């Protein structure tokens, strides 16, 4: 008996919650609220009708003429999208690290060239050869270009 009474009360509350509410001013100038305004009174709706209980089919699927995805297909699609995003993030991270390392190396080479030390290289015969001023200037220009290319501002 108690359960039946509880069920009836819950159904009454559910109906009251789902009803449209209105606000109006009565003939005495007092603001009144209710689910049905009296006739001849200008009433303002307080909230819209309750949302539909079942979700509408996706507009993208209905526009393209495709069937909606099953939960399993939707899950697999989300997993694939997540894997693609992770691959893209890993590739971007690798590219950023490469740029950082190349920037550091180019800056170190530029500091070495601008330090005024004698710079040497090894020729085809394995002998040490020092750069003259013209070669040093050309190498400095080349390394400055590398710094501009690899280092963000």
Image (cartoon, rainbow, N blue to C red):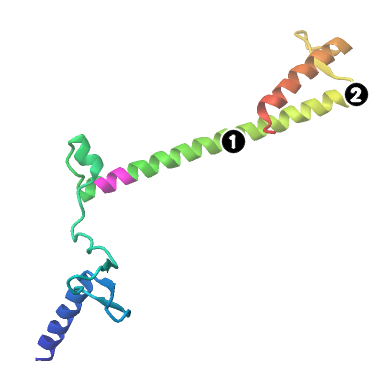
Q: How crowded is mark 1: few (under 14 residues within 10 Å), some or many (20 or more)?
A: few
Circle on res. 96: 1
Toward the viewer: 134 or 34?
A: 34
Circle on res. 116: 2
The Cα–Cα distance between marks 1 and 2, rounded to whole angstroms, is: 32 Å
Toward the viewer: 142 or 27?
A: 27
Quadrant, the C terminus: top right
Toward the viewer: 48 or 143?
A: 48
At 15% from the left and 78% from the top, the residue drawn is 11
In the rendered image, residue 20, in percent from the top left (x then y), is placed at 22, 69
Q: Which residue lies furthest to the front in this view?
A: 27
- Up/down of 6 relative to 142, above or below: below
Question: Which quadrant of the view contains residue 138?
Answer: top right
Q: Nearer the viewer, mark 1 or mark 2?
A: 1
Toward the viewer: 15 or 23?
A: 23
Question: Which quadrant of the view contains residue 96?
Answer: top right
- Label 1: element kind: helix
The part of the chain drawn in magenta is: 74-78
In the rendered image, residue 115, in percent from the top left (x then y), is placed at 88, 27
At 21% from the left and 74% from the top, the residue drawn is 35
Q: Main secondary structure of the magenta part?
A: helix
Q: Residue furthest bottom?
A: 1
């Amino acid at each position: 008996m108690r359960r039946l009474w509880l069920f009836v009360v819950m159904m009454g509350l559910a109906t009251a919650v789902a009803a449209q509410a209105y606000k109006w001013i009565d003939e005495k100038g007092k603001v009144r609220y209710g689910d049905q305004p009296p006739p001849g009174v200008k009433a303002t709706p307080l909230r819209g009708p309750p949302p539909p209980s079942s979700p509408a089919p996706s507009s993208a699927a209905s526009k393209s003429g495709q069937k909606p995805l099953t939960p399993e297909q939707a899950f697999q699609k989300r997993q694939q999208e997540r894997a693609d995003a992770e691959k893209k993030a890993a590739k971007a991270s690798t590219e950023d690290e490469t740029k950082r390392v190349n920037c550091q190396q180019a800056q170190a080479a530029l500091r070495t060239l601008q330090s005024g030390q004698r710079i040497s290289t090894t020729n085809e015969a394995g002998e040490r050869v020092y750069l003259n001023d013209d070669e040093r200037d050309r190498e400095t220009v080349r390394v400055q270009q590398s710094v501009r290319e690899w280092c963000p501002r």
